[in-house]
Image: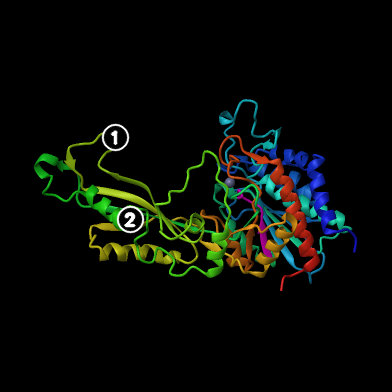
Amino acid sequence: MTGSRAGAIARAQREYDDGVFVDRLAKLVAVPTESHPPEHKADLERYCHAVLGPMVRELGFETVVLDNPEPIHGPVLVATRIEDPALPTVLFYGHGDVVRAMPERWRTGLDPWTLKIEGDRIYGRGTVDNKGQHLLGIDAMGAVMAERGGRLGFNTKIMVETGEEAGSPGLLEFVRRHKDLLAADVFIALDGPRVSRTVPDVTLGTRGGIAMDIVVDLREGGHHSGHWGGLLKDAGVILSHAIASIISRDGRILVPGWTPKNVPDSVTRAARAVQAEVLPGAPVPEPDWGEPGLNNAERIYAWSSAIVLASISGQPESPVNAVGGKARARIQLRHTVDVKAEDVVPALEAHLAAQGFDEVKVVPVTERDAFQASRTDPDDPWVKAVVSSFAETSGGAPNIIPNIGASGPSEYFRQTLGTPVIWIPHSYGGCGQHGPDEHGLGTLFRDGLGLMAGLWWDIGEKGRPA
Ligand SMILES: [Zn+2]
């Protein structure tokens, strides 16, 4: 056996120090791969065929570029490298598309499509979301292969889609259609910001998001408030009371069935141990808001949150002296896998009926292929393998995030392919993704190259975790 774990990590980090990683990232960033609106389909195709494709073929991958099941959207690059069918297979996911560049909003001297380094910051659209992150995983594979005499020690499938920023249209159907091509033992993707610049994250899922309107519709038109106020029910007042029955004045959810009955111990343990960084300029969590008895991490990663996204009665822009007959609000519930999505609307209907709000109707906001809540158990053997690998590389335990507070496509993969789903972010909260001046941090890329080289080395060394 040639090479060593430390040798693989050193090779990966040397690639950063020698500027090779940044040069390759510049090539990826230079392709204007905006996915929404789908005017850039030719660029999305070029990214797969002519830019990222050759980089993975150099490492011995065979590539195919497959159509999105919704052909208006960009294609999906699938790269496969099988060393031995008996070895474990890693499915590695990323996305080559980016949000709108909005060049007019970037600081003078910065251009979204031209990589620019200033101190530790590496600016460019897609540097962290997600080009820099999937490149990092791929380059760490290259370092391990070089160290191990051309072998990784496991099989790899790389899937890079180009519609993520448009909500991953067609992704679920794609994964179903290509289930065999994508079959693997574990799904690993690098995406998103870490909660701390000093501690790596292992993220195991997402919350689901469900929106619904609550609607009060008593009568057509308004009636003179002098003649009818006090005689006719006011839709705005009824709506306000309905909202107050859903969320208490200190932010607690009051609808039975909207919060978990039980939170698994492994999830509570992981959430309580999360060490998050307080970013300058970010709001500070309010101690007297939300479910009492939970710390901040548990409130986001292990519990539900309900928000009033919008509410309206009358005409706020030009109020009229009239008793209004109509009012509505949009409520959003974010929930973990411990609350079933299909129970959410019926639970609210039952709650409003029990509270006597006969005039209030619940209208679900339907979204096709809505992102579901997803969670891989923090005690899953693959999770433990990643955690112990990171602990060995960085000298301390990583944060284990049972699921992020937001939503994403984790469940598409977990359910369709039956794999544990593990996200490893290499960005930070101040990275400007989705806004102007998107940038990655050189220290986190270098750190990430080392962590991923260590992880790929360990999977090749130890095989499937018991
Ligand atoms: Zn994004």
Quarter of the image with the N terminus is bottom right
On screen, residue 332 above or below 260: above
Q: Residue 313 is drawn in which quadrant?
A: top left
Report the amino acid beneath label 2.
Ser
Can see residue 180? Answer: no
Quarter of the image with the C terminus is bottom right
The residue at the point 40 percent across, 66 percent down is 343
Question: Is 283 placed left or right of 161 in the picture?
Answer: left
The residue at the point 54 percent across, 50 percent down is 167
Between 195 and 224, which is closer to the camera in this rendering? 195
Of all residues, the one furthest to the top in this rendering is 108
Report the amino acid beneath label 1.
Glu
Magenta residues? 186-194
The residue at the point 70 percent across, 65 percent down is 385
Between 41 and 223, which is closer to the camera in this rendering? 223
Between 117 and 420, which is closer to the camera in this rendering? 117
For label 2, count other residues whose C-alpha is less than 10 Å away and answer few (under 14), some (14-19) or many (20+): some
For the residue with label 1, is its CB less than 8 Å from the closest atom of ligand 1? no
Which mark, residue 317?
1
Separation of marks 1 and 2 at Cα, in angstroms: 28 Å
The residue at the point 20 percent across, 52 percent down is 218
Q: Per the image, is 163 magenta?
A: no
Question: Is 388 placed left or right of 297 in the picture?
Answer: right
Q: Per the image, is 193 magenta?
A: yes
* Secondary structure found at label 1: loop
Q: Position of residue 440 (x, y in %)?
A: 66, 41
Can see residue 108? Answer: yes
Circle 2 sits on which residue? 248
Q: Earlier in the sequence, mark 1 or mark 2?
A: 2
